[in-house]
Image (cartoon, grey):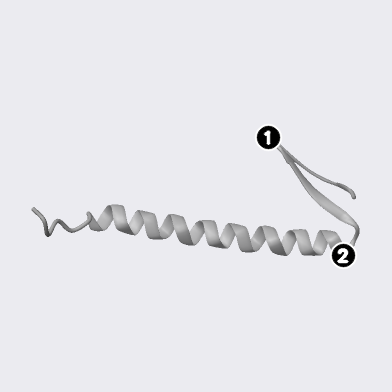
């Protein structure tokens, strides 16, 4: 029992979740960079997303 390996399905889901979060963060950073270029910022209020002047 000391050599218990993690469930491969659970591990795969964790890896996919981490990858998706990394992609989401990268996408958000790219969107914010473009909006900054046009003096705008991203405002997220659930369930609405608004692009507004800074």
Q: Is residue 48 left or right of residue 52?
A: left
Residue 2 location in percent, x, y? 11, 56
Q: Give the mark nearest the N terminus, 1 or 2.
A: 2
Which element type, helix, strand or loop, lies under badge 1? loop
Above or below — where is 53 with respect to 33?
above
Q: Residues within 10 Å of mark 2 (few under 14, many from 20)?
A: few
Q: Is residue 45 left or right of residue 54?
A: left
Circle 1 crowding by C-alpha within 10 Å: few under 14, some 14–19, many from 20 = few
Q: Position of residue 24 (x, y in %)?
A: 59, 57
Q: Position of residue 50 (x, y in %)?
A: 80, 43
Q: CA distance from mark 1 to mark 2?
A: 25 Å
Residues under numbered marks 1 and 2 in contact, where contact means CB atoms less than 8 Å apart: no
Residue pushed farthest left?
A: 1
Residue in the image at 87% along x and 65% along y: 37
Point 42% across, 59% down: residue: 16
Q: Residue furthest front?
A: 2
Question: Disc 2 designates what residue?
Answer: 37
Residue at x 39%, y 60% (from the top left corner): 15
Dot 2: element: helix
Q: Which mark is residue 5?
A: none
Q: Where is residue 28, by image quadrant?
A: bottom right
What's the residue at 31%, 57% (across, down)?
11
Left or right of 6 in this view: 43? right
Question: Which of the labelled discs sits on residue 46, or is there none?
Answer: 1
């Amino acid at each position: 029992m000391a050599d218990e390996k993690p469930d491969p399905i659970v591990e795969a889901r964790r890896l996919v979740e981490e990858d998706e979060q990394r992609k989401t963060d990268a996408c958000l950073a790219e969107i914010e960079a473009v909006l900054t270029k046009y003096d705008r910022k991203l405002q997220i209020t659930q369930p609405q997303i608004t692009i507004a002047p800074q």
